[in-house]
Amino acid sequence: MTDDTKHLIEVFDKRVERRNHRREFFKSALGAIAVAGAGAGALSVAGKAQAADVTDPDVLNFALNLEYLEAQFYNYAVFGTGLPANQLTGTGKQGTVSGGRKVVFTDPIVAAYAKEIAQDETQHVAFLRTALGSSAVAQPAIDIGSTPTSAFSNAARAAGLVGAGVAFDPYANDENFLLGAFIFEDVGVTAYKGAAPLITNKTYLEAAAGILAVEAYHASLVRTVLYAKGIDTPSLRTSADAISNARDSLDGTTDLDQGISPTTINGALASNIVPLDNNGIAFSRSTGQVLNIVYLNNAAVAMGGFFPAGVNGSLNMSAAN
């Protein structure tokens, strides 16, 4: 292990204290949300939202579905086990997790990142479930397997990473794990940003903004490591770009995604770690567009892909593109 690697791991350890501060924020927010939740208003939504009136609990339950998916993927990849049973119950049909296993990481930096993200996503699930109380949706059926017909394989096939009948295994090695994580992370950021205008209660909005910031950090971690590894392995960078293009092909005609290949600024080479529009602002996706990607379908459907039986809650239809 090099001195640089030892130093980076020491930096990761020091993050524990900062994460404790973040937990205190969540605990403070829970009390306020419990009081405000019953009076959360409704908002008439235009565009691609599926319901005429969307309440704050509707939006948070939509987010909870996505957090279930991320938390289960990272927990299986890091620990070889999923979320505890008491974090899976709720309204709607509770489903099981298909696939998932521990990754034998060879890069200690990737392993450290993965463990941190797994802990954060587990906390997000617990936080949203407590905030929603008895209205929290149950975990739906989730497919994070590695067979030729799994959601990961179908997503990789749509990106051109594997051929017909070939499996993509996100647990096989560090690089595959990063590509699997890349499928989710940018989508989570655009989902929370797109949902922000739908939230009417300021306490809910502050809590969602806190999670959005964490998801953005996660996305940047994954993009940064893929970018760095792609310098020596261009095919890895090309694979990430292909995943980005596949996401864009699912969520409509507007370009809401960017890969990680270098770009030029004023004629000089620059990285593309942070995907932004021409105003330097992160992209947004509607709930329908988010479901296009996780359902792996560019039509209006109620299930598919990583959620083979659909998500729980009122916001459950993908958009017709």
Image (cartoon, helix red, strand yellow):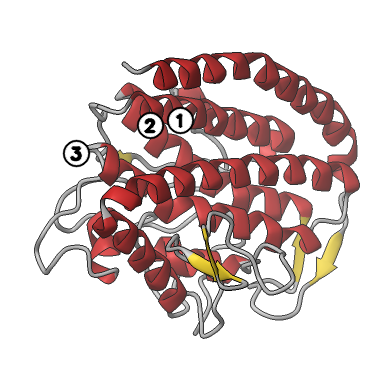
In screen coordinates, is 219 left or right of 259? right
Vertical placement of residue 3 versus 211, above or below: above
- Residues 138 and 47: in front is 47
The image quarter in which residue 304 lies: bottom left
Cα distance between the residues tagged 1 and 3: 17 Å
Tell me if I can see residue 69 in this picture: no
Contact between marks 2 and 3 (CB within 8 A): the answer is no
Between circles 1 and 3, the one closer to the viewer is 1
Element carrying mark 3: loop
In screen coordinates, is 141 left or right of 86? left
Q: Position of residue 317 (x, y in %)?
A: 53, 69
Name the disc covering residue 113, or none: 1
Residue type at numbered disc 2: Val
- Residues 43 and 151: in front is 151
Work out whether mark 2 precedes mark 3 in sequence or the reverse, and give the earlier one: 2
Contact between marks 1 and 3 (CB within 8 A): the answer is no
Element carrying mark 2: helix
Residue at the spot 69% in from the left edge and 54% down from the top edge = 58
Residue at the spot 45% in from the left edge and 30% down from the top edge = 113
In screen coordinates, is 268 left or right of 309? right
- Labels in figure, total: 3
Cα distance between the residues tagged 2 and 1: 5 Å
The residue that disc 2 covers is: 110
Residue type at numbered disc 1: Tyr
Q: Residues within 10 Å of mark 1 (few under 14, many from 20)?
A: some
Residue type at numbered disc 3: Ala
Tell me if I can see residue 187 in this picture: yes
Cα distance between the residues tagged 2 and 3: 14 Å
